[in-house]
Structure formats: structure tokens, C-alpha cells
Image: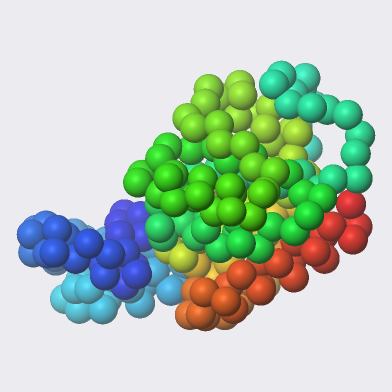
Amino acid sequence: MPHGCTDPAKLRYHWHKKRWIAPIERWLFRRADRLIATCSEEVEWIKAFEPKVKRVEVVPLSPVSVGLVLCPMSPVGYDSAQTSMLKLLYVGRLHPLKGVNFLLEALPEECKLVVIGKDDGEGKKLRKIVQRLSLDVEFKGVVSESEKEAAYQWCDVLVLPTLSENFGLVVAEALERGKRVITTDGAPAWGDGNDYGGRLIYLKGYRGGTPEERVLLLKNAINKLKCHC
């Protein structure tokens, strides 16, 4: 299971490093009796990367329990007071392909964003954007499972502004907890037309758009939810 590693966007990123491992990956792909993809787009990525694969099968990873609202727990470390402010959450690596910079540029007033995840070299740049725009953003870094759960319970909306994600487990985690989610066609497994009772906003045209278009798509989606906060 390649886990999205054949996405052209990922292959282009630091290709000078990845070219050394690519021949080994292609050799492994040719020897495998079956490769597993999470969506039809990933099938295309795999076949473009190595046309001589024997078989590629889509095994959807959509959560079987979406719609299950977990019992609320005390959100330790988070302000649980009722407020009109829209509370946004991002969970994932701080990496250029994750699109957090576009999310920051799109963040409107009266919104608070909590960012959870490992810094993969993008943290300094993101903090500069926060400072420049005077945003209400808190970087938590890597946290425990209990604190991540608290963050899910605290937030109104999970945002995954990714440019390259074959699935996006955090989307499933948020939906399972009854949260609203904004994600993009950078996570094509979620573009099957199911909006999970109006809780999933899937931004088409984001991945191939200009930086300005990506920011506008995110801003419009956030403002739409903000009006219903």
C-alpha cells in the first residue's frame, strides 16, 4: 500500500532526494501481486509511476462509524466557554504540502485556530504569517492522545488544507466526533460526493489553483461556517 507516495505533487517535492529510492519502489511495485489504493485518483498515480504493476485495487478507507458522536470529555487546556468565535483545528505535520500557510492567509477575524503537529521545517514561516496578520493562532506542537482528543472536543471545525493527501485520517477522526470538516481535492478520497449530512465541505479546484485562489476557497468556506456559528 503506497499511502499516497506516488502522488505527483509528492514526487516533485525534493525530487533530487527521492530519485534514489524510486527505482527500488518501482521494483517492489512490479513484484507485488496487488497494490492497494484508497481512491481512483491514487490508482492513476500508481500506474503513472510504474505502468507494469500487476493489479491495483481500490479499498475505500471511509470510516464505518462516521456519525458516531463520542461522549464529550473535559477539554483540559482549552477554553470551554460558549462564544461566538469560530474555533478551528488543524492536526498534521507543518509541511509545505499541507497548505497551512493558505489557511492562515484565509483566517478571518473572530476565529481562533489551534495547530497540532510536528514541525517539518514550516513552523518558522507559519509563525511569521501569524505575526504579520495578528492572528489568534496557537501552535501546540506534538501532543498526547488525551490532549488531541480534548482539541477535537473543543473545536467547531477541523480544517485540512492539504495539497497532497491520499486519505486524511484526521478527517475521519473529526467526522466520527460529530465535527464539521473543511478539506480539499488534495485529499481525493473525500471527493466521492458524500457530505456526511452537510458536515463535510470539499473544495474542488484547490490543488490546481493559484495561491490566491486557494486562499479564497478556504476563506469562503470558513465564512460560510462562521455565519452559522
Q: Please say whether residue 91 is visible from this viewpoint.
A: yes
Measuring from the top left, give residue 112's x and y in whole percent. 73, 44
- 223 left or right of 96 in image: right
- 7 left or right of 140 in image: left
Measuring from the top left, give residue 69's x and y in whole percent. 78, 37
Asked which colour scheme the image uses, the reply is rainbow
- 133 left or right of 55 in image: right
Q: Nearer the viewer, residue 186 or 30?
A: 186
Question: Is 73 above or below relative to 62?
Answer: above
Question: Is 126 above or below relative to 53?
Answer: above
Q: Nearer the viewer, residue 200 or 138?
A: 138
Q: Residue at x 66, y 73 (%)?
A: 217
Q: Nearer the viewer, residue 221 or 8?
A: 221
Q: Based on the displayed image, in which of its 4 quarters is residue 161 positioned?
A: bottom right
Quadrant occupied by the N terminus: bottom left
Measuring from the top left, give residue 43's x and y in whole percent. 36, 72
Q: Residue at x 56, y 63 (%)?
A: 102
Q: Residue at x 35, y 77 (%)?
A: 44
Measuring from the top left, give residue 2's x and y in whole percent. 30, 57
Q: Please say whether residue 175 is visible from this viewpoint.
A: no
- Report the number of numbered marks: 0
Q: Residue at x 61, y 70 (%)?
A: 215
